[in-house]
Image (cartoon, rainbow, N blue to C red):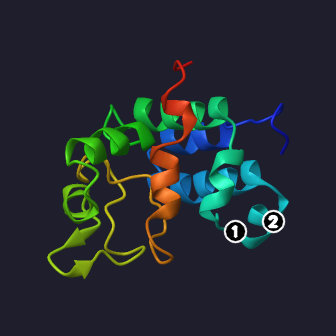
């Protein structure tokens, strides 16, 4: 997938059908493809690869999530919540339903794959390697540029 040619129709169709779990998996795959061959092959992002994702692509993926969740899900929704809690991860995770007390929400069965989930619950970002990837997504230059 080159920077000039990205197609998110498959993500759009899954979101329109409210198949949020599969849309989440495909969103991660698309982000990996946009970040480069190594990320696509590996199936997950290094924080240093997030900047390779074109702004327009990230904005488009986000716009699809926001549209087909009635404004409940998307990276921009997560960003707004994160900024609203002062970029405090310990306050952010419970707010979006990724952690309850000292317990992390377990993937995939404990996540809520419908619009009854807390605002900002989706799309998921793997936190096993720390918060750097999600932080880079939430501070991506796409959010400083005008939305499509």
Residue 82 visible in the displayed image: yes
Label 1 CA crowd tier, 10 Å (few <14, some 14–19, many 20+): some
Residue that label 2 marks: 38
Q: Nearer the viewer, residue 91 or 116?
A: 91
Query: SS for tag 1?
Result: loop
Q: Residue at x 49, y 63 (%)?
A: 132
Q: Residue furthest left?
A: 101
Q: Residue furthest bottom?
A: 102
Residue that label 1 marks: 43
Residue 21 visible in the displayed image: no
Q: Nearer the viewer, residue 139 or 119?
A: 139
Q: Position of residue 67 (x, y in %)?
A: 43, 29
- In front: mark 2 or mark 1? 2
Q: Nearer the viewer, residue 117 or 94?
A: 94
Position of 115 relative to 93 (above/below): above
Instruction: Judge from the rendering whether residue 130 lies leftward or rightward of residue 140; answer left or right.
Output: left
Instruction: Judge from the rendering whether residue 80 lies leftward or rightward of residue 136; answer left or right.
Output: left
Query: SS for tag 2?
Result: helix
Name the disc covering residue 118, or none. Answer: none
Label 2 CA crowd tier, 10 Å (few <14, some 14–19, many 20+): some
Choose the circle earlier in sequence order: 2 or 1: 2
Instruction: Judge from the rendering whether residue 95 lies leftward or rightward of residue 52; answer left or right.
Output: left
Q: Position of residue 71 (x, y in %)?
A: 33, 32
Q: Position of residue 64 (x, y in %)?
A: 51, 33
Quadrant of the drawing holding the N terminus: top right
Q: Residue at x 33, y 31 (%)?
A: 70
- Between the C-alphas of marks 2 and 1, the distance is 8 Å
Q: Are marks 2 and 1 in contact (CB under 8 Å)?
A: no
Q: Residue at x 45, y 46 (%)?
A: 138
Q: Residue at x 68, y 51 (%)?
A: 30
Q: Position of residue 90 (x, y in %)?
A: 22, 66
């Amino acid at each position: 997938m080159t920077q000039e040619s990205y197609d998110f129709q498959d993500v759009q169709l899954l979101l329109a059908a409210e198949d949020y779990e599969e849309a989440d998996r495909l969103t991660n795959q698309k982000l990996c493809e946009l970040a480069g061959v190594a990320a696509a092959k590996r199936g997950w992002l290094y924080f240093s690869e997030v900047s390779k994702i074109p702004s327009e692509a990230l904005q488009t993926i986000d716009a699809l999530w926001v549209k087909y969740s009635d404004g409940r899900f998307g990276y921009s929704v997560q960003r707004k919540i994160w900024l609203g809690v002062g970029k405090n991860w310990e306050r952010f995770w419970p707010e979006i339903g990724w952690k309850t007390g000292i317990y992390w929400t377990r993937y995939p069965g404990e996540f809520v794959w419908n619009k009854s989930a807390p605002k900002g619950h989706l799309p998921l970002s793997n936190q096993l390697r720390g918060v750097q990837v999600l932080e880079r997504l939430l501070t991506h230059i796409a959010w400083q540029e005008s939305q499509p």
